[in-house]
Image (cartoon, grey):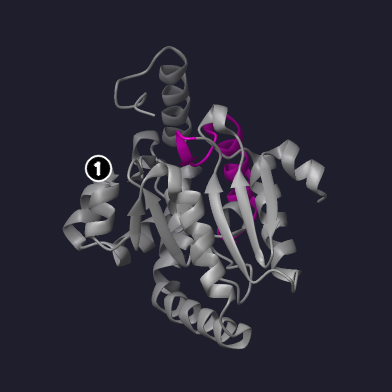
Amino acid sequence: MDADRMQAAGVRVQREDAVATVTIARAGKHNAVTPELDAAMAAALRALGADEAVRAVVLTGEGTRAFCTGADLPTLFPELRERVQHSPAPVNFCGLTHVHPPPGKPLIAAINRLALGGGFELALASDLRIASTTAQFGLPEPQWGVVAGAGGCTRVLHALPPAVAAEVLLAGRRLSAEEAFHWRLVSRIVAPEVLAATAQQMAQRIVAASPTAIRGLVEFWRAQHWRQDAQALDDERRLFQQLICSPATEAGIAAFVARRATGGTAAEQRP
């Protein structure tokens, strides 16, 4: 997929020396993921993985309101339902959550405000996470009758203390940036205006080191996490497939979209 098609789908890729920045570029829609954006993100990450000149990747969202708020419900969920009905493969959201490109190249999530649903899952699937002081993290999927099926359930349970993870998964608790830092979900929080520069500085420090050592460390790091998560990810996939194909979930998503279109509740309109 060429750069123009990627940008039309809502994915922008920029290069600075050996660091590539991938931006989810649908700021007007809180960087929610459509089927086209999902495919474009996967294509962008594959291309960067094959580009030997790129040695680190920063992932962020356009604008000041959201990193990514997950699936664009009216467009992506019907496609996800179609996928799981015809394939036993896991939902590999944006080409990242169940396959880990780019190989050997650290992926830094620079989280600018809302990381909800699939957006939180993208952050969790990244190697390093830094956040602005305005960031918020949550998995609201049970409101629609489904679960965070792109690694969210699995990785939240491993990233957070059990009681906190249970609140996030079951009660829809949103974590503030300060809470995320306290629970070691992110390595640092910085002012919104310096987030992009901080992510670039981190990436530049990484690419200044030995390429062979960094590649080896990244692959070692990821292998440990995949071994830890493998069975839970399989169990999560089966639960997600069961729920997303149910009539109750279809009705729940339709009701949520209808409420949002007419103003919704305060909780739904918080972005």
The amino acid type of the residue labelled 1 equals Arg
Q: Nearer the viewer, residue 255 or 24?
A: 24
Image: 93 above or below 52: above
Q: Position of residue 65 (x, y in %)?
A: 45, 33
Q: Secondary structure at mark 1?
A: loop
Left or right: 246, with 145 as reference point: right
- Look at mark 1 in the image and give the residue it sits on: 173
Q: Position of residue 171 (x, y in %)?
A: 23, 42
Tell me if residue 68 is in the magenta stretch.
yes
Q: Position of residue 60 (x, y in %)?
A: 53, 49
Residue shown at the point (32%, 60%) measured from the top left: 185
Q: Nearer the viewer, residue 152 or 180?
A: 180
Q: Is residue 186 visible?
A: no
Residue bounds of the magenta highlight: 64-91
Residue shown at the point (34%, 35%) measured from the top left: 143
Image: 138 above or below 249: below
Q: Nearer the viewer, residue 35 or 21?
A: 21
Q: Position of residue 137 (x, y in %)?
A: 34, 46
Image: 94 above or below 185: above
Position of the C terminus by quadrant: top left
Q: Residue furthest top?
A: 262
Left or right: 244, with 212 as reference point: left
Residue shown at the point (47%, 62%) measured from the top left: 125
Tell me if residue 265 is in the magenta stretch.
no
Q: Nearer the viewer, residue 220 or 63?
A: 63
Q: Badge 1 local density, few (<14 within 10 Å), some, or many (20+)?
A: some
